[in-house]
Amino acid sequence: MPTLFITGANRGIGLEFVRQYAADGWRIVAAVRNPATAQELKAIDGDIVVRKLDLEGDFFEIEWAALAGSAPIDLLIANAGTWGPAGIDTVEDAAGWLNALAVNSVAPVMLARTMLPNVAAAGGKLIAITSKMGSISDNGSGGAIAYRSSKAALNAAWRSLAIEVKPQGVAAAVLHPGWVQTRMGGAGAPLTPQQSVSGLRQVIAGLTLEKSGGFFDYDGTSIPW
């Protein structure tokens, strides 16, 4: 039975990942900020363990992930993220920008590093959910500096990570889920979580060491950096 470790599993895309992989018989370690409020997650049938992991808290909490022990992890999905301030105009905005960098960029890489022995043991995959808004080439509108820069930083870090872990037989990639009907994407987004995750799962399944280090859309097309 393959094992998935996923963050931000209590809503939106993360919750849908859990639903779909659980339906296929995967064992899932679902990390959330507050397990007490993750009722929808707990209602999903399957071999699912809900764990507390607050990526906005002390970075030392990320080392908790090592409690997964020596069990192989076939797939790690760093899904949790934050939007950050809309503008960078005040000291408070600057603090929010730093928080966005911590949650969207630093925490996922620390988590991947912590769980790397587990993933390498399975010859597994490291996936970070990013955004096309982190593409410098694709930025034609400006704005959302905190979010854009934090995702661009994630993309750069994950690319380096992919190069470093490839000799261990681990493939890594950053994936854009599309514009999805979630709390962040809004009700007017063209994709449902089911459609997005279905596409993302196909991309993940097709990820090989030769494709490792790529930046892909939910439909499998490459996105410019």
Image (cartoon, grey):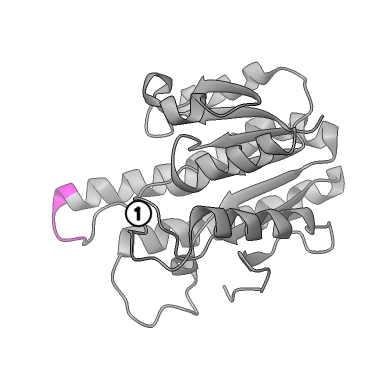
Vertical position of residue 3 compared to residue 206: above or below: above
| Left/right of residue 27 with respect to residue 187 in the rendered view | right
| Left/right of residue 113 with respect to residue 130 in the rendered view | right
Vertical position of residue 137 compared to residue 81: above or below: below
Q: Does residue 221 show up magenta in the picture?
A: no
State the residue lying farthest toward the left: 90
**Residue 147 location (% of width, % of height):** 36, 58
Quadrant holding the C terminus: bottom right
- The residue indicated by pointer 1 is 184
Foreground of the two, 45 or 55: 45
Quadrant holding the N terminus: top right
Q: Secondary structure at mark 1?
A: loop
Residue at 59% from the left image edge and 39% from the top image edge = 19
Foreground of the two, 152 or 195: 195
Vertical position of residue 117 compared to residue 197: above or below: above
Is residue 58 something that shows in the picture? Answer: no
Q: Which residues are magenta?
A: 88-92
Residue at 40% from the left image edge and 61% from the top image edge = 149
